[in-house]
Amino acid sequence: MIRLLCALLLALLANVACAAEPAVVTIEQAQTVRSSGWDATQPPAAGWVPVKLMDEWNSRWPGYSGVVWYRIRWNQMDGSAPVGLLLDYTCMAAEVRLNGSVIDRDYSLVEPLSRKWHVPRYYLVQAPLLRQGQNELLVRVSGMSAYQPGFGTVSVGDPATLQASFNEAVFIRRDLQILDFAIGIVMASLFGLFWLLRRQDTTYGWYAISGLFGGLYGSNYIADSTWPFPTTNMWQSFIAACFVAMVVAHAIFLLRYCDRRWPRIERALLLIATLALVLVPIIPDWMGPQRNTYLLPAIVFVYAANLAFIAYALRHRRSDYLVLAACVSVPLVMSFHDLAVYLCWMKASTYLGALLSPLTVLGMGFVLAYRFANTMKRVEGFNAELTHEVHAATSQLGETLNQQHALELAHSRAGERLQLVRDLHDGFGGTLVGTIAELKQAPEDMAKSRIVDILSEMRDDLRLVIDSTAREHADLAELIVPLRHRASRLLEAADIEDHWSIQGLEGVDIGSVRSLDLLRLLQEALTNVFKHSRARRVDVTLEISGSNLRLQVRDDGVGMASADPEPRASREGGAGMASMRLRAQRLKATFDVNRREDGTVVNLLMPLMA
């Protein structure tokens, strides 16, 4: 009975011990030793020292760049069941050996180093690699002193638990960084397109530039190699230069969002960012290891810029300012943790900036979209107001044009009536006055034929007035036709052959006033041929010569009956040589009459444009 009770007690104690055994054991003690060179494949036999994980070897070997070996040992009660193995941090590249067998190796353990520092390493270990009893994990870490080289804790235990821990760490350290990178690039591209469409609103452009360099800087957390750069130093100098450019673009973006411009300060900042980018391929071996020389001032500057904007937003209390201030406040708070990790003030393997960064980027995108929407509303309101004003102005202009058209029509009609009065007064009126004077002085037995001739002259002059004023915009070719018909009948009655040469007058319009003067001059020249020349043939030429109109009337008669035609012209009703010269003067034409033995030639050369 006593033996049975002892057996039950021992079984109970064993069950309690098994229940108390944790599912996962985190190992924080290890041994480490420096390697003799980058290419060493085995650790040194001596020189091992104990360390507490996580370990950053700069505190032990300042300035050392190369290979450091870490050795971790633990006892495994059951070597037949699968076991999960989680390595929290290896910076930068590593090779992992379990009980002498290589279970993982980065593809480059020498320059340029592989970059798998940002994610943990998980392995599902089974027999025969796993031993019951003592197991040894040997990790070769390749790192550079300027970039926090070291090794994190090791966890051994339940595969499901460690797999979940691994997935969570990968999500935080890599997946969120990829999401942050993707959202940042998409938002930068979107607002970059807005800027290209609205070049005058540079706020979107500076946000796009800031997002672009922010995405390039964020690639440091997702890239597993230094491509396209040949060394780790050049990669890190490029990442640091991108951070500087991002800070500068972000500061100018905040200024533009506040509708502020500080040209001298902006030029100085842009010069610093440009210089940092230009020096990347020139002095990478200084810019990489010594990046804190210019990164820390940039960090202080971006803190100052964000705090200044937050104060500005609180002072102005505008809704979009406050939302943007909240967007920059969240990463500002989170960045203190990441800055402490970066400066080795805190030992940690996770940067927290990516946790809320996507929400921050989306918030800033919302603010910019809100600004764009308000801008579009203002533009639409302006367009509506402009449309209304244009409609009102158009209506007013239409009324004004209608009034102007009515006035111009009335003026045109008055002008036409006045012109008709002038034509009747100058031409027909003069002929009528001369005829009245001649009839008063004529003998009682004046021949009937003479009276008929006088009346015919008056009729022909009246016809010229009617022909030149009845047609609007009539060309010379149309106006010449009735005159030519009447003149031909008159000359034919006197047994005088008339030959007409009219060229290029179609479509030529010199105005009703000038047309009437030209027709009267031509009529007077033909009348003189009919009355005085005793010719048998007359040739009439009307043609366009360059920018001039040429008129010529040539007959084969004996010429004028008198050397001084002025008195005769007056007796003939005001249609004499003086009248022809006066009309030529009004037409601004060159006029001459050549009397020869074989006839008379009348020449007129007038410009088409008065």
Image: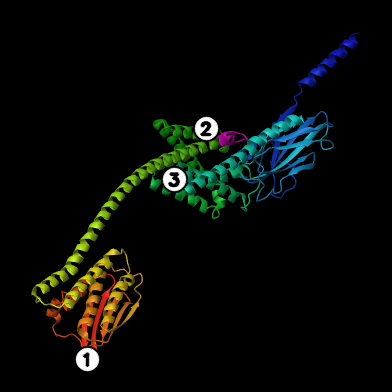
Expressed as whole percent of the image width and height from the top left, the position of residue 519 reads 25, 73
Disc 1 residue crowd, few under 14, some 14–19, many 20+, Cα 10 Å: few
> Is residue 169 left or right of 511 when viewed as pictured?
right
Choose between 229 and 409: the one closer to the eye. 409
State the separation of the CA atoms marked 1 and 2. 115 Å
Q: Earlier in the sequence, mark 1 or mark 3?
A: 3
Q: Earlier in the sequence, mark 1 or mark 2?
A: 2
First to last magenta residue range: 346-359
Expressed as whole percent of the image width and height from the top left, the position of residue 556 reads 25, 88
Identity, as a three-letter code, of the amino acid under mark 2: Val
Expressed as whole percent of the image width and height from the top left, the position of residue 448 reads 17, 76
Q: Name the disc covering residue 201, or none.
A: 3
State the separation of the CA atoms marked 1 and 3. 88 Å
Q: Name the disc covering residue 2, or none.
A: none
State the separation of the CA atoms marked 2 and 3. 26 Å
- Per the image, the residue denoted by label 1 is 597
- Per the image, the residue denoted by label 2 is 330
Q: Looking at the image, which residue is at 29% across and 78% down?
A: 489
> Is residue 351 left or right of 76 when viewed as pictured?
left
